[in-house]
Image (tube, rainbow, N blue to C red):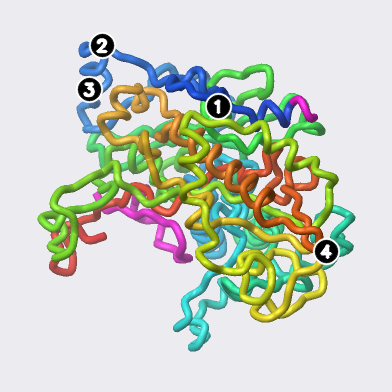
């Protein structure tokens, strides 16, 4: 079986072949933690299920075609016919779906979060960090250049105190991590526009946000996907709903088949048109379809014996992945201490000193010149030079910092290994394939870094406010990104090619 995992590239493959690749009280509830407890339940997340040896053995049984079987699938309420299915509306997923539609293929895409765009929207890293060599050569694809223009012309939806409400994103773009920084909701709207523009070439194509992948069906050979199962959630009160920005709490409600007090659920089946097959692309940033279907993949660090790399580790460690991050935004604005008071309620299982030991700006100035604040400054109200100028009142910076809100302790690891997927029953009822407790620790760490910045780096000339709720560009109650910025997921292994046993 040939396999593909799409994350950050735009291409299209002929569909004749199948590919498998993969309110205040409310706010306080989103921010508070139970202090000094080691249980997942006390930390506000559901504990991983404990299974007996017999249950684990049963959960590890595959169908004769070598694939898992989704259990207890509710009656399908919608059936989509698709020549191409893209699982995940990441930046790569949007690119793949748009390219497929422009090629005339009837394309379907499902995305877990309320926003398309992945890294540049729901993951909160709305700063385009491009290769210096590519910038020098300007050898970017026309579609990528066009997509950036979509972003630049988005009207800004910002607090009134910025003074730039309704201006295009290009008019406030002044950061030094790259040439284009912008609010995450601008990235989401640009991704939506790109998809709508591409659909003119394939009018029967469709996509759905707030929709979780739940598993797949294969033919008797185990090589061809015949259906994708998904569940869409619709807030019961859409006019007042917004994501919490605490995936640790939202993970189970987002993936569960059943409706609850917050969401009405719709089971969906994606399948090929009669007499045809369909291409399926895993464009999730953790490789959800790849992990669920048990397509060969690697996870974590690889040893020298596995890769032949001289300086690799002595053993494979699938639990050792790159840090994930929960980005947030800070604005130069005096909110009278309101956001500081909110962040003061954040507590953690790990001692506060342990968190603060890793908080550092690494000798970089906070505000003036080539500064921490200007690094990913998504809103510059005076459009000033990020390398030499100081920010002014109304400016907003995105915070995604290695010595700050990166969570690299990974205890427990974020991405569940095969053994953990078996023990937690994921193969019968897919719930995202990641650890809610790890998410909880990372969220706490990010909130503590925000508090540390306000307490140690705000000045009378540069008052800082932590942006959350209606004023927050992340679109969440907590002010954290809807989901983490994921740097590393499951790495799919392909067929033998070009002299490699498993060409990646």
Gap between marks 3 and 2, in whole Å? 15 Å
Residue 393 numbered mark, or none: 4
Which residue shows up at 58% across the image and 73% down it?
A: 178
Packing grade of label 2 (10 A; few <14, some 14-19, many >=20) is few
Gap between marks 3 and 4, in whole Å? 60 Å
Contact (CB < 8 A) between labels 3 and 4?
Answer: no
Residue 61 numbered mark, or none: 3
Element carrying mark 4: loop
Residue 55, image x, y percentages: 26, 13
If you read the primary sequence from the N terminus, does the residue marked by circle 3 or circle 2 appear first?
2
Residue 322, image x, y percentages: 37, 52
Residue 296 is one of the magenta-drawn residues: no
What residue range appears in magenta?
Answer: 1-25
Element carrying mark 3: loop
Gap between marks 1 and 2, in whole Å? 30 Å
Which numbered disc, 1 or 4, marks the residue closer to the eye?
Answer: 4
Check the picture and name the quadrant holding the C terminus. Answer: bottom left
Instruction: Identify residue for label 1.
Output: 267
Which numbered disc, 3 or 2, marks the residue closer to the eye?
Answer: 2
Q: Which residue is farthest left?
A: 305
Gap between marks 3 and 1, in whole Å? 25 Å
If you read the primary sequence from the N terminus, does the residue marked by circle 2 or circle 4 appear first?
2
Q: Is residue 138 above or below residue 145?
A: below
If you read the primary sequence from the N terminus, does the residue marked by circle 3 or circle 4 appear first?
3
Which residue shows up at 86% across the image and 64% down it?
A: 164
Instruction: Identify residue for label 2.
Output: 52
If you read the primary sequence from the N terminus, does the residue marked by circle 1 or circle 4 appear first?
1
Q: Is residue 454 above or below residue 307?
A: above
Residue 435 numbered mark, or none: none
Gap between marks 2 and 4, in whole Å? 59 Å
Packing grade of label 3 (10 A; few <14, some 14-19, many >=20) is some
């Amino acid at each position: 079986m040939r396999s593909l995992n799409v994350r950050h590239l735009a291409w299209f493959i002929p569909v004749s072949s199948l590919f498998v690749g993969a309110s205040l009280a409310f706010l306080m509830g989103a921010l508070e933690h139970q202090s000094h407890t080691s249980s997942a339940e006390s930390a506000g997340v559901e504990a991983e299920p404990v299974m007996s040896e017999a249950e684990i053995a049963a959960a590890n049984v595959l169908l004769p075609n070598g694939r898992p079987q989704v259990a207890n699938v509710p009656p399908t309420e919608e059936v989509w016919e698709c020549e191409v299915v893209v699982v995940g509306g990441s930046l790569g997923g949007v690119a793949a779906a748009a390219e497929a539609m422009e090629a005339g293929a009837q394309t379907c895409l499902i995305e877990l979060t309320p926003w398309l765009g992945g890294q540049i929207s729901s993951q909160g890293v709305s700063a385009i960090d491009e290769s210096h060599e590519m910038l020098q050569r300007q050898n970017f694809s026309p579609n990528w250049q066009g997509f950036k223009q979509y972003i630049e012309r988005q009207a800004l939806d910002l607090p009134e105190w910025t003074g730039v409400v309704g201006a295009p994103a290009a008019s406030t773009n002044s950061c030094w991590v790259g040439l284009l920084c912008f609010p995450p909701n601008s990235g989401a709207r640009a991704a939506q526009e790109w998809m709508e523009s591409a659909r003119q070439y394939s009018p029967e194509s469709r996509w759905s946000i707030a929709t979780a992948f739940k598993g797949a069906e294969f033919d008797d050979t185990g090589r061809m996907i015949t259906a994708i199962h998904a569940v869409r959630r619709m807030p019961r009160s859409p006019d007042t709903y917004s994501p919490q920005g605490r995936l640790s709490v939202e993970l189970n409600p987002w993936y569960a088949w059943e409706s609850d007090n917050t969401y009405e659920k719709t089971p969906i089946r994606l399948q090929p048109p009669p007499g045809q097959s369909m291409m399926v692309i895993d464009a999730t940033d953790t490789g959800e379809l790849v992990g669920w279907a048990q397509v060969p993949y690697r996870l974590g660090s690889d040893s020298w014996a596995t890769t032949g790399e001289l300086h690799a580790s002595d053993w494979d460690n699938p639990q050792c992945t790159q840090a994930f991050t929960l980005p947030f935004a800070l604005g130069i604005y005096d909110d009278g201490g309101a956001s500081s008071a909110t962040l003061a309620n954040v507590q953690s299982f790990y001692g506060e000193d342990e968190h603060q030991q890793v908080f550092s700006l690494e000798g970089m100035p906070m505000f003036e010149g080539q500064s921490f604040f200007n690094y990913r400054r998504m809103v510059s109200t005076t459009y000033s030079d990020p390398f030499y100028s100081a920010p002014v009142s109304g400016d907003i910076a995105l915070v995604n910092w290695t010595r700050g809100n990166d969570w690299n302790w990974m205890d427990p690891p974020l991405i569940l290994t095969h053994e953990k997927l078996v023990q937690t029953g994921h193969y019968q009822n897919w719930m995202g394939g990641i650890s809610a407790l790890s998410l909880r620790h990372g969220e706490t760490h990010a909130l503590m870094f925000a508090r540390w910045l306000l307490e140690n780096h705000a000045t009378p000339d540069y008052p800082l406010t932590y942006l959350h709720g209606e004023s927050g560009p992340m679109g969440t109650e907590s002010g954290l990104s809807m989901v983490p910025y994921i740097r590393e997921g499951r790495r799919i292994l392909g067929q033998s090619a070009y002299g490699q046993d498993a060409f990646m």
